[in-house]
Amino acid sequence: MISTVLVANRGEIACRIARTCGELGIRTVAVHSDADGNALHARVADESVRLPGAAPADTYLRGDLVVKAALAAGADAVHPGYGFLSENADFARAVQDAGLVWIGPPPEAIEAMASKTRAKELMGIAPLREVTEADLPVLVKAAAGGGGRGMRVVRRLADLDAELASARAEAASAFGDGEVFVEPYVEGGRHVEVQVLADTHGTVWVLGTRDCSLQRRHQKVIEESPAPGLTAEITAELHTLAVRAARAVGYTGAGTVEFLVAGDRAHFLEMNTRLQVEHPVTEAVFGLDLVAEQIRVAEGHRLDGDPPPARGHAVEARLYAEDPAHDWAPQTGRLHRLTVPGAVRLDTGFTDGDDIGVHYDPMIAKVVAHAPTRAEAVRKLASALERAVIHGPVTNRDLLVRSLRHPEFAEGRVDTGFYDRHLPALTEPAPDPYAPLAAALADAHGRSRFGGWRNLPSQPQVKRYAMAGEEHEARYRHTRDGLAADEVQVVHADPGLVVLDVDGVRRRFEVGRHGDRVWVDGTALTALPRFPDPTAQLAPGSLLAPMPGTVVRVADGLAAGASVRAGEPLLWLEAMKMQHRISAPVTGTLSALHAAEGQQVEVGALLAVVDPDQPPATDTPPA
């Protein structure tokens, strides 16, 4: 029997594994980088061991340090979670060689399936060796790992070499393996996967399907089980192929076989030899704890009988600290408050007051709803997200709510091109017009400008806020009866709650303040100074760092004086395990380059300046 598990991971998955271990009476040991010294996963474990450094390559990807930590803490088993070393066969062997139980499939199965190139060969599929115009579009894909890292869609042959180099660098940073391959890119397909669970006695359970088609940058955003709209024939084929893949490599434990479904055809993508991020939807539908089942399999127990019957429908949304309206740029900063109401499951690696840093994935939490029908589960999840209180960096919460309520999603007509078609409409700012007034009234509560009241009305007070990229003014007055506004009736105002009567309907606004930032329900505002600084201006064509990170690459030969085209990539910035391309905003001349490879930059740092080309003068004929 396992008594102590070291969780070789971080964030929400480490917390989720620790929760199950606690319920089973198993002690847990966490590992943490210097950046994660006070992270939630390190606090909820019974003990923790420091991995010196901050970058994944120096910490969570150092298998030798993780094994050493397990031995030092007296652990007798290691659970890898997902990502990092979870699909590293050498790490699995090192765990076993140290006399520890590996809570995962045999290293040989990981080796056979961890490389997507070898997995495809095992299933009789060969990657593209030479790419021609006729093959376009193609997908560049990391052979190891997942989560969308090291993946690029290439639509022009001229872009192939640059995208290959970028994908290799990103894959090496995220997984310690820079191998990539090229395969045809199927437009408009659905990303469908099958959950399998196998024991060491030859039993393989199939635990239904999941649809993970709503993706950004090839990373899943919303997942559900079962996958809607599949015919009985295609479902049976998916199940058969998943079992074949598992048996082909002698698989044990929890694993996922992924497919791209287009029409009535299923294209094998890969087998993930680990727990998936979206495993909670399967748990909800089948009433299982997959982490507990992984531990039971690792202890040698059998899977008794048939899998439990599926019931109802479950939907999961990944809440990220990112700005979907600005190329999904990851965000950093303090998460002051996170509360998700309703009967939903919340898996998170953060609590109020925690900082979201630059070194790791920007996912804050997973929110999961389960109900008897798909429509009910979707409604429950959208409502919970809409009413969630999130004070901190910009998130994708509004995008999630709008996606769940989009007609295509509501009808189950989704594919991997959903955001390509709908992103502009889904990210259109729609701030509450009364949010600035509510913020101003909450701030003004108890602040009277007069020692005594006169019969003459007071002058209106004005407060300025930045909201959804625009400046807004709020006007109110102090009266003998309290605070008042011209356009609405102020029913109540205190620092945390404002109630306004708008055309006979009373509306409640919950207000939170942290520094110069104010949150009114789901709307974030920044208080502006009364007199703006006239010197705070930048030259046209200035390129600013959209996030803190490291400059990992500058375009070959790029220097001041070079001619550049609008949209041409100039440099690449790495943050939160992803590489972000910084492109020329206009066609013109690069007049300044302030970035260098290896340089650490803060958000808003000036990276380069492109002077736009002036159009040629045209002679105006005399009148």
Image (tube, helix red, strand yellow):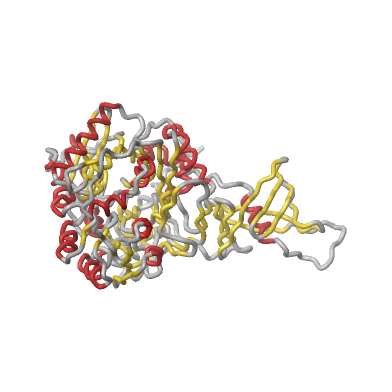
**Residue toward you, 333 or 98:** 98
Name the quadrant of the N terminus: bottom left
Residue sticking out furthest to the right: 455
**Residue toward you, 484 or 289:** 289
User: Taking 146 as reference, is 409 left or right?
Assistant: right
Residue 155 visible in the snapshot: no
In the rendering, at what x and y percent does residue 497 appear? 65, 55
User: Taking 239 as reference, is 16 left or right?
Assistant: right
User: Taking 144 as reference, is 465 left or right?
Assistant: right
In the rendering, at what x and y percent does residue 596 appear? 30, 66
Q: Residue sitting at 44 percent across and 35 percent down? A: 372
Quadrant in the picture for residue 539: bottom left
Total numbered circles? 0
Q: Residue sitting at 18 percent across and 50 percent down? A: 114
Q: Residue sitting at 13 percent across and 52 percent down? A: 108
In the rendering, at what x and y percent does residue 361 appear? 35, 57
Vertical position of residue 113 compared to residue 310: above or below: below
In the rendering, at what x and y percent does residue 442 appear? 66, 58
Q: Residue sitting at 25 percent across and 73 percent down? A: 72
Residue 584 visible in the snapshot: yes
**Residue toward you, 515 or 531:** 515
